[in-house]
Image: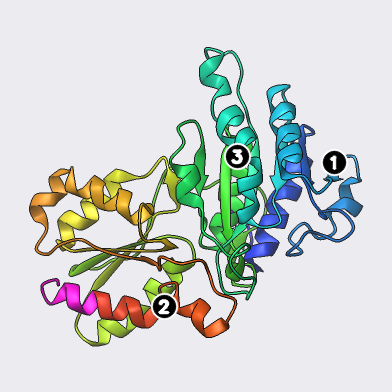
């Protein structure tokens, strides 16, 4: 029997995934600052403390390093913790546990242990939270062998990829764009997973490939509608996973369209688009290119508090349109 499909918000989809994981596996529990009675910084955890109790929805002290350490230790002992950071920026306070412990233990112990921890990071700009609460740091963690790093762009993927992350034997870092929490989309009832490491073609096209991540997938699709009216047929690839990256899907798309535009919110330099660009340059798709690869990333600046300046520091639809038009006409 087919699973019933409803419209859920991105936040509701994540909450439902956590509830299903906890109902399905008694080893799963939640940790994080203010995730209990308060329901989480962005109200994603909601009423799960009332449903599962304070022993499985645990409010942690204001110490990301300490909380992450407990989560990693719990995972090594066989539990499956889901640790929520209030903001992705606060990963910087826990890098020792994430980078030196979670990512390395399986390797350093010869595969004798696994570290099935999931860490959730509300990320990105657009909420007026300023420079220390608005960054996109997924490329930082994507640089680390041993970690899996994902960026679901839809409610469907948010639920399915979280459930896949909980079942994964390795540490999975989930970057959830804060502006996506209220967006809605179809989400089946019950348990399902979306594979980690597989990109999705959100729109097929023949003239230009846009590889986008997270909220930029939606901006790219909006731009593609305008470009279609102008006779430019855009293919939009939702990368979904930063590590391990789905190279095959991107390569085949670029071989088809012969043009590549990478759109991501993180700072342009050394960002996700740099890796995608290098991967294409080193592949057979390079010989198919009819124009230079273009990266459209965040500005080389901390995120400003001022809302107009904040928007100006990350790609918006008009920026994607301008870059795509130039690329479709032969490149810059």
- Checking the image for residue 316, the label placed there is 2
First in sequence: mark 2 vs mark 3: 3
- Residue at x 50%, y 39% (from the top left corner): 148
User: Do the CB atoms of the residues marked 2 and 3 lie less than 8 Å apart?
Assistant: no
- Checking the image for residue 95, the label placed there is 3
In three-dimensional space, the C-alpha distance between marks 3 and 1, rounded to whole angstroms, equals 24 Å
**Rendered location of residue 10, percent (x, y):** 62, 64
**Rendered location of residue 203, percent (x, y):** 34, 67
Count residues near mark 3 (Cα–Cα under 10 Å), then give few for <14, some for 14-19, many for 20+: some
- Residue at x 83%, y 55% (from the top left corner): 34
Q: Nearer the viewer, mark 3 or mark 1?
A: 3
| Image: 193 above or below 307 | above
In three-dimensional space, the C-alpha distance between marks 1 and 2, rounded to whole angstroms, equals 40 Å
| Image: 311 above or below 207 | below
Q: Is residue 65 left or right of residue 297?
A: right
The magenta stretch is: 324-332
Tell me which corner region of the image, top left, top right, bottom left or bottom right, holds residue 180: bottom right
Tag 2 secondary structure: loop
In three-dimensional space, the C-alpha distance between marks 2 and 3, rounded to whole angstroms, equals 30 Å
**Rendered location of residue 111, percent (x, y):** 54, 15
Count residues near mark 1 (Cα–Cα under 10 Å), then give few for <14, some for 14-19, many for 20+: some
Q: Nearer the viewer, mark 1 or mark 2?
A: 2
Quarter holding the C terminus is bottom left
Q: Nearer the viewer, residue 230 or 267?
A: 267
Q: Which residue is mark 1?
A: 56
Tag 3 secondary structure: helix
Q: Nearer the viewer, residue 271 or 247?
A: 271
First in sequence: mark 3 vs mark 1: 1
User: Do the CB atoms of the residues marked 3 and 1 lie less than 8 Å apart?
Assistant: no
């Amino acid at each position: 029997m087919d699973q019933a499909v409803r419209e859920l918000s991105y936040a509701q989809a994540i909450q439902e995934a956590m509830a299903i994981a906890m109902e399905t596996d008694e080893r799963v529990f939640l940790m994080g600052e203010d995730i209990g009675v308060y329901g989480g910084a962005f109200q994603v955890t909601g009423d799960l403390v009332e449903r599962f109790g304070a022993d499985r929805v645990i409010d942690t002290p204001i110490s990301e390093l300490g909380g992450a350490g407990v989560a990693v230790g719990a995972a090594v002992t066989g539990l499956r913790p889901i640790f929520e950071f209030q903001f992705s920026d606060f990963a910087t306070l826990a890098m020792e546990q994430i980078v030196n412990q979670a990512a390395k233990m399986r390797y350093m112990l010869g595969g004798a242990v696994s570290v099935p921890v999931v860490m959730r990071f509300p990320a990105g700009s657009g909420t007026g939270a300023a420079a220390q609460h608005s960054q996109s740091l997924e490329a930082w963690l994507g640089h680390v062998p041993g970690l899996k790093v994902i960026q679901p762009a839809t409610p469907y993927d948010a639920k399915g990829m979280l459930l896949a992350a909980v079942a994964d034997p390795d540490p999975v870092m989930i970057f959830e764009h804060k502006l996506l929490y209220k967006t809605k989309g179809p989400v089946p009832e019950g348990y399902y997973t979306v594979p980690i490491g597989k990109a999705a073609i959100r729109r097929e096209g023949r003239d230009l490939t846009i590889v986008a991540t997270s909220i930029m997938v939606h901006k790219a699709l909006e731009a593609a509608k305008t470009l279609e009216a102008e006779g430019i047929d855009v293919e939009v690839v939702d990368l979904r996973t930063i590590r391990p990256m789905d190279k095959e899907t991107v390569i085949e798309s670029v071989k088809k369209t012969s043009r590549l535009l990478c759109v991501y919110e993180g700072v342009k330099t050394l960002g996700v688009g740099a890796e995608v660009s290098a991967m294409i340059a080193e592949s057979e798709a390079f010989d198919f290119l009819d124009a230079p690869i273009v990266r459209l990333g965040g500005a080389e600046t901390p995120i400003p508090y001022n809302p107009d300046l904040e928007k100006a520091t990350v790609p918006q639809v008009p920026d994607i349109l301008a870059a795509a038009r130039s690329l479709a006409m032969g490149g810059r």
